[in-house]
Image (tube, rainbow, N blue to C red):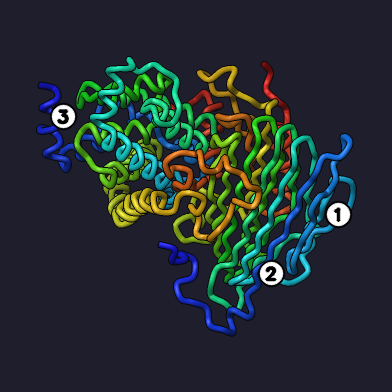
Amino acid sequence: MTTPLLSPAPPSPAERAAAVTARAVIATRASGGHTRLETLRSEPPLTVRQTGPGLVHLVSTGAGPLGGDRLTLVIDVAPGTALEVRSVASTLVLPGPSPADSLMMIDAHVGAGASLRFTPEPTVLAAGCSHRMAVRLSLAEDATVFWREEIVFGRHGERPGRCRARFDATVAGRPLLRQELVVGHPEVEGSPAVYGDARCVGSTLVAGPAWDAAHDSKRERRATIGAGWAALPLAGPGVLASALAQDTVELRARLGRAEQAAAVPPER
Amino acid sequence: MQNDRRKGGMRGSPDAALLLLADSRLPAGGHAHSGGAEEAVRLGTITGPEDLARFLRGRLATAGLVSAALAAAACELASAGHDEQAAAHDEQTGGRDGQSDDPAGRWRQLDAEADARTASPAQREASRVQGRLLIRSARRIWPSPVLDLLAKAVPNGVHHPIALGAAAASAGCDPYQSALAAAYNAVTGPATAAVRLLGLDPVTVHRLLADLAPALNDAAHAACASLIDDVVMEPGAADPFGPYGTANGDAKGSTRGPGWPALPGHAAPALDLLAEGHHSNTMKLFVS
């Protein structure tokens, strides 16, 4: 049962030595009405640095993630505090000496009345990579979040490696959004149903008490759409901004429009 | 008498029940939905059999897999609690808003898992419309207390895959058959719509569907495997990453329900855009 589904064969000693397991932690604390960074711990290649009040940048201090790497980021936003997390550069996922998947896990909790803005630069899937991402975002009842995720299908002119990115967001334990993006697998490649001819995909979850849809459970709120983007009101208290594009510049522009439309809370 | 038919009649012939359930002639309104194909045709991203094949394969691997898993979960829930739910329903008159151990509450929980996997409001609406119609028909074709309970538990219309799983259970099918029916529905509707919209050769398109047969089986197997995985892996280890999610001491993770959170959630951003584009288009043949 505990057989890891990800690595069919146990890694050789050389592979084990090459692969990295790293964990970074960002936690806030309320202090006299201000947000203080309580914990800031990291291990290469995943480094976190405070760059302003309530602002943290992820800094990649090594290549990758590479095949076999297991990186974990824990974010704990204490009740009543505000945190913003960005990254200095995009993440380039590469194949590594180990045939195992590279793993990037993010476990984030946003407490009561707290807010989290997570806007890292895109993840680029280099040819031959085999990557898994998993985000578990648990929100307290009245927490607010802005969570952006952008995936680029290979560097310029390159066919992408493989990736599965799972995202689970809950509000007070209730499911808000569960989605998994699969990239570079033959069944989805070039499918007009999945990404069409797009070379990158972006989605941003905007959620919080202002988007609480409980006032009208019989009617769905309408989406806002444009060329290659949509702001999709969820069944729960949030909106998913979604965009497809040919390149990162177009993606950011489209996702930006979708995020703007998503950021307008529904009228009551 | 009804009870006898439920237990003895249809339950003895699940294969035939599966055929009836998956048949496009089942009067449950499925023919009115193109699953994004009409909008894709309008935008020119489906122009012929090659595009259609890629559309169907991608749809099956995403929305189809998710539907299959939800249908399997619904069938399992319906079968497991058949008698127990009937009793509870009779005693409580069904209407009480409940915690997770009350049967109506569990159906609402599963329905919420479908909501969380359907970001597009147009798709949620289409799914609920089809679910409501299917429940209405199925209650007359395969009457059972579970379908009565489900209709009361989610009066605005339960998501279609959940309705399908519950109807399948009432017809005597198992979770694998429910998943197969859901996966089959996920591709046959768009395929038929494309034939009508583009005037494609129906034989060519049916050949595409035949080519997908192994993928349909795989999706149904994967759907059922995800149910088993959940049972074994819960709580807290639903993903194969080992210890994870306990760093914050967040106990809420353990109250999420009976293994459903880890069911597949494969997203198809293009289908979301197509569904919303279709919804705002006034010149259309299909409902979705």
- Badge 2 local density, few (<14 within 10 Å), some, or many (20+)? many
At label 3, the amino acid type is: Arg
Residue B82, x across and y down, in percent: 25, 31
Look at the picture and state if B210 lies above or below A204: below
Do residues under tags 1 and 3 come within 8 Å of each other at their CB atoms? no
Mark drawn on residue B6: 3
Look at the picture and state if B182 lies above or below A51: above
Instruction: Kindly identify the residue that appears in the image at 71 percent across and 62 percent down.
Output: A91
Instruction: Kindly identify the residue that appears in the image at 32 percent across and 44 percent down.
Output: B179
Relative horizontal placement of residue B97, taking residue B242 as reference (left or right): left
Callout 1: chain: A
Of labels 1 and 2, the one closer to you: 1
Callout 2: chain: A
Question: Residues under labels 1 and 3: Cα distance?
Answer: 64 Å
Residues at marks 2 and 3, common chain? no
Relative horizontal placement of residue B157, taking residue A134 as reference (left or right): left
| SS for callout 3 | helix
Do residues under tags 2 and 3 come within 8 Å of each other at their CB atoms? no
Residues at marks 1 and 3, common chain? no
Mark drawn on residue A101: none
Q: What quarter of the picture does the N terminus of chain A occupy?
A: bottom left
Q: What quarter of the picture does the C terminus of chain A occupy?
A: top right
At label 1, the amino acid type is: Gln
At label 2, the amino acid type is: Gly
Q: Which residue is mark 2?
A: A64
Q: Earlier in the sequence, mark 1 or mark 2?
A: 1
Instruction: Kindly identify the residue that appears in the image at 45 percent across and 64 percent down.
Output: A5
Specify the quadrant of the image occupied by residue B152: top left
Of labels 2 and 3, the one closer to you: 3
Relative horizontal placement of residue B53, taking residue B236 as reference (left or right): left
Residue B48 visible in this rendered orientation of the protein: no
Mark drawn on residue A50: 1
